[in-house]
Amino acid sequence: MLGFSPDFPLRQTLASLILATGLSSLAATAQADEGLTKTWALAEFGEPLYQDGIEHWPYVNPDAPKGGKIKLAAFGTFDSLNPLILKGQWPRSIGLTGEGLMVNSGDELASAYGLIAESAEYPEDKSYIIFNIRPEARWHDGKPITAEDFKFDFDMIQAHGRPFLKSFYDDFESVEVLSDHRIKYNFKTRDNMKPLLLAAGLSPTPKHYWADRDISKTTLEPPLASGPYRIKSLEPGRSITYERVEDYWAADLPVNRGINNFDEIQYDYYRDPTVAFEAFKAGSVDFHDENSSKRWTTGYDFPAIKSEKVIKREVQDETPSGIQAFFFNLRKDKFKDARVREAISNLFDFETTQRTLLYGQRTRTKSYFPNSDFGASGAPTEAEVAILEPYKDQLAPKVLTEAFEPPKTDGSGRIRANMRKAIALFKEAGWSLKGGKLLNDQTGEQMSIEFLLSSPVLEGITSAFVQNLKRAGIDARIRIVDTAQYQNRLDDFDFDISTVRLNFFPPPGPELRSYYGSAAADVRGSANMAGIKNPVADALIEQIVEARDLETLQATSRALDRVLLWNHYVIPQYYGDKFWIAYRNRFAYPETRPKYSHGFPTTWWIDPEAEAKLEK
């Protein structure tokens, strides 16, 4: 989903794990013992980047001073502190309070280094993995973290977890507690590193804490955790404050040196991004991650910028991006015909939107895996054709021969050619323009479309689209609701078209089942927003999950990309290849930043001299 809060690494809870399959830290030494590999680090393909042992990440200052309080903005609201269940809205920043067996570095996409686990063991066929838990690992109440806590977490997800989280365990067969400090995950797969990496990111849930509480329900009682921060205070729906844990058990591990430098981090919640930006301009928010092209281009001429009390920067973003698009709800009969979806796509005038609303700052999305090596581009390669060939009878011929290009205009705002094509496609699908209304030839019903949004940020772009739809005789309108209602309606698939961003976790894997798999299409709360049920897509997703080498995985994900694109399940929007950030001039940060992040707030710290100057 769209948002504007800074990018905390959500690596601590299971929900966090599923939102990041890159993992990080510590050095890796692997040894073979009768076919068993024991290692400090894992990599899905090839070797971990850091193998010889490190004292700290190269993109941190290990001597960064601790201290200070920062205020940040979050969008929407929250009414629960339980991120694992479907019910309730939870603060995404709650990942600060937890941690996993292993963690990711900011320089890699698919490797893992020990945190709670001091080492891992797995056999040659990769049918299981055993994690050896550090004896010193403990909860904030001082009790040790044990294998039972990981088993409890796994069982809880199976019984009560959100469907999207459950989907990540499809390849898990069972979990065994071998001792207090050894946990074993058994897999259905063989010779596949992906499930091992997923297991490496798992987080514990304190069994003793939940013994007299109902974990299947929402709660506003700060739950017991074990990570670098704990919840200090909160105003439900309005604000949540975290404090750094002074005696955090893992503070001196190499993976944690030089990070988590702020004593307090407060999130204030805003329902309107414009109001949040005004709070930033007024000094009530310390850091702003910009996502509005117009505001970035025209909105940063306020006095604090000119006096350098606020710094504005562009930082290159190399992170593979998720697709942001208008998602059709194929559960609605009016969208079941691909010709209808293609016709509507012709009425989205991206080129005019780019010129008038995006200030030329964005790139048109042409893939479900933009800004990455996993998306299709140009005509299909021989490798992609070979993968698609067995399914050619179920595919349009152009899927195997042509490059996918979304409809284009000349950017003038006049879309006559696109309008004519759209009307022709509607006619083929049984919809005719009569008396200025697009009517169904059989029922006489007018085509109607409601766009469901949760933020005014996208209203301008959607409004321009709506005007074109109205010219085609469609009863089109926009509905903006609060974030809680928005999430509930998405969970219930109660929408016509909605703007959604789905992040994939490179290399793509099991999350694709929930995004685009048939089995997830009718599961309430799944991430298959469009309701896609395509047997070819299902087969390709399984080939991606089972891929044994990076080249095969890339070719297969590109083949899947083509199948999804040519079926017009979504109308691709745009993405950016830069972080747009602005912040009060009170911070310092390492000269080297992590490859896949701007580093805030993880590696930044308060600069005492800049702080004094700013206050003065």
Image (spheres, rainbow, N blue to C red):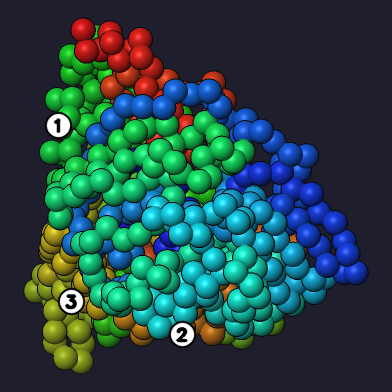
Q: In which quarter of the image is residue 336?
A: bottom left
Whether residue 360 is visible, yes or no, is no
Q: Residues within 10 Å of mark 1 (few under 14, many from 20)?
A: few
Q: Is mark 3 on a helix, strand or loop?
A: loop
Q: Mark 2 or mark 3, which is nearer the start of the sequence?
A: 3
Pick the quarter of the image with the N terminus: bottom left
Q: Mark 2 or mark 1, which is nearer the start of the sequence?
A: 1
Residue position marked by numbered label 1 in the rendering: 278
Q: Which mark is residue 519?
A: 2
Location of residue 424 in the rendering, given as x and y in whole percent from the top left corner: 32, 72
Describe residue 325's horizontal placement relative to residue 78 as left or right.
right
Identity of the amino acid at label 3? Answer: Met
Give the residue drawn at x 58%, y 65%. Answer: 198
Describe residue 568's horizontal placement relative to residue 190 as left or right.
left
Decide which of 129, 509 is in the foreground and name it: 129
Q: Could you give the CA–CA distance between mark 1 and mark 3, rounded to whole angstroms? A: 40 Å
Q: Residue 310 carries which label?
A: none
Give the residue drawn at x 27%, y 61%. Answer: 81
Q: How many numbered discs? A: 3
Q: Residue 447 carries which label?
A: 3
Farthest left residue? 435
Farthest right residue? 34
Q: In which quarter of the image is residue 383?
A: bottom right
Give the mark toward the camera: 3 or 2: 2
Q: Could you give the CA–CA distance between mark 3 and mark 2, rounded to whole angstroms? A: 29 Å
Farthest front residue? 142
Relative to 558, does residue 49 appear above or below in the rendering?
A: above
Give the residue drawn at x 12%, y 73%. Answer: 437
